[in-house]
Amino acid sequence: MPRWRTKWDGNVYIQYLPEEVEQVKQTSMIDFLNSEYGFTFENKGSAYICKEHDSLVVMPDQRSWYWNSRKSHGRNVIDWLENIEGYDYQSSLQKLIGTPDEPPRQSGYKKAPQLDGIRPAPETKDFVLPPKAEGQMKRVFAYLINERKLDPFVVSELVKEKMIYEEAKYHNCVFVGYDESGTARFAESKITNTYIAALKNENGKKKFHPINIAGSDKAYSFNVSADRERYPAGNNVLYIFEAPVDLMSHMTFSLMTEKRKAESENRMPDNRCIRSVNRLSLSGKSDKALSAYLSRNSNITMLMFALDNDDAGNGESEMLMEKYRELGYVCKRIKPRFGKDYNECLQIVKCKTEVQNSRPQITTRTENAIPIMPNSGYGRR
């Protein structure tokens, strides 16, 4: 059963056991969609096709699904609530499992069947990076630097390393993850059109979210390694974020700190400080990318969880920290000073700085000034 837990700062959250979450992930999408929306499905052999929306497809395992017209997909019912309904992770679990004060809810849905023998393979696509835009990637640079307030050096360095580029069709920003041989295995696409990105559904949640390119292997999610020779102390530390932009925001904060320090010491800043530690984006909250990264990097001993500072991010951080502490890692939780994530914090800090720098300097004006006689007796009786 889920239980109430209190953190060191006094805030209360609901902790769900891993087996409870795993049981929810086994929910039949056929039964869930029928119960919640009245959707009916026809078995086409290789998949279940929704009669009301023929672009909505549930795979033979009855857990994974695709909704092609909405360019959305998921592996289970939790992904549906997050991607289609706009729930956050914690709210999804509350809907499906319940709270400590009420009976479990997942018992109302059937469990997806276990397929025996040879099961039809879900339709998959080979991983292919979207074509790159011709030219200077103006939209990506404008979006990351002007809108997201990332440092131009951070953006330029990752562009040079082919970890970021602008795709040709929609001019979205693509974040790329590579395997040990330098082969691209993962890509996440982020909308650069701020008007479209800001659209919300009737629940007040964002309508469009970053998407993983078809065929992406999340085991190689977007990450930036430490410069082990220059910064050996950071070789065993891994900072963990939900999204690439938060990861790059943390790099920007490192560079801002170094620039202030260099100015006070009257020297040039060391821009390579952005590689002082290892950083990983989970591309969500699942720890698949984290588990795979740790299996490839035995040097990591300390995990710094920098997930979003909201109910979902805090709850997931607590669960992951408990899990990886049991595996022998030193785990710490870090939060941005302002806002719910590191990019929101960066935008707040940068905007405050810009406002302060734009204020006119107050100077003493002497021309045409009216002299004040010290002993004029003004106001005396």
Image: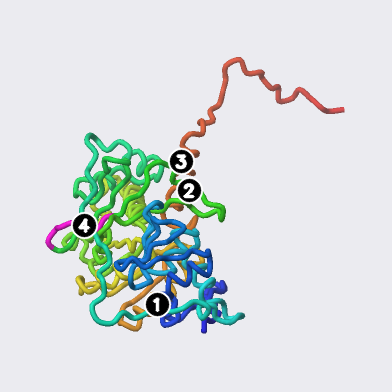
Camera-side residue of 171 and 24: 24
Foreground disc of the pair 1, 3: 1
Earlier-in-chain disc, 3 versus 2: 3
Q: Amino acid at mark 4?
A: Phe
- Asked which secondary structure carries label 2, the reply is helix
Disc 1 marks a residue whose amino acid type is: Ala
Residue appearing at x 41%, y 42% in the figure: 147
Marks 2 and 1, Cα distance to the nearest angstrom?
45 Å
In space, the residues marked 4 and 3 are separated at their CA atoms by 29 Å
Left or right: 90 with respect to 163? right
Q: Residues within 10 Å of mark 2 (few under 14, many from 20)?
A: some
The residue carrying mark 1 is: 112
Magenta span covers which residues?
181-187
Three-letter amino acid code at disc 2? Answer: Ile
In percent of width and height, residue 184 lies at 18, 56
Res. 348 mark: 2
Q: Is residue 343 magenta?
A: no
Residue 134: quarter of image: top left
Q: Gap between marks 1 and 3, in whole Å?
A: 39 Å
Question: Going by the image, does 353 lie left or right of 292?
Answer: right
Which of the two discs, 2 and 1, sits closer to the camera? Answer: 1
Please, what is the three-letter code of the amino acid marked with disc 3? Tyr
Q: Residue at x 20, y 65 (%)?
A: 232
* Residue assigned mark 3: 195
